[in-house]
Amino acid sequence: MAPNRNAYWLALLLPTALYGGALISQYGFGLYPCEMCMWQRWPHIAAIILAVLAVILRAKAWSFLLVIAAAIAVLVSGLIGGFHAGVEYGWWEGLTACATNLPAGGDMLDSIMNAPLVRCDVAPWSLFGISLAGFNFLLSVAGAILILAMVATGRKDGNHG
């Protein structure tokens, strides 16, 4: 038995879209990530890899485990995003210092002095009062729950997608 094919595709497309959005915001709009932003990216990368494997190996009876693992990775990113959003909103203290991106090569002191300082407790952008970390929390947690529900429903129904 396997989850329906929508679970496979959501497990792939959701983290790809969220990670892609993070890269576009960084390289397209100059919203440099802080350390906690980077923490949110790693589980999305893991989810993408797991979901690609799940899609490739969909005919295998155990491929649903890869979909579940991808959903858990998406959930982890969302929970990190929720923690980060709480730091941005001042609900609690963060665990890290500020981060910066240093370009490779060149004069190190010059690079340090001219590098943008990115604070983890300040949201660089928000929409309707929700920061990027907040959106990651909302979309990732909801998406992970939906993927897991699709897996459970598909397994119960015997849907082979």
Image: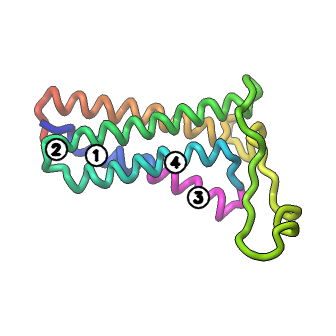
Q: Reply above or below: 131 against 102.
A: above
The spot of residue 120 in percent (x, y) is: 74, 41
The label on residue 141 is: none
Q: Amino acid at mark 2?
A: Gly
Which of the two discs, 2 and 4, labels the residue nearer the N terminus?
4
Q: Amino acid at mark 1?
A: Tyr
- Near-viewer residue (150 or 103): 103
The residue under label 1 is 8
Q: Please say if the residues under marks 4 and 1 sit with CB atoms less than 8 Å apart.
A: no
In front: mark 2 or mark 4?
4
Q: Which residue is mark 3?
A: 23
Q: Residue at x 36, y 32 (%)?
A: 146
The residue under label 4 is: 42
N-terminal label among 3 and 4: 3
The residue at which mark 2 appears reads as 161
Locate the N terminus by quadrant.
top left
> Which quadrant: the C terminus?
top left
Disc 4 residue type (three-letter): Trp
Q: Are marks 2 and 1 in contact (CB under 8 Å)?
A: yes
The reply to whether the magenta stretch includes residue 153 is no
Q: For marks 4 and 1, give the one nearer the viewer.
A: 4
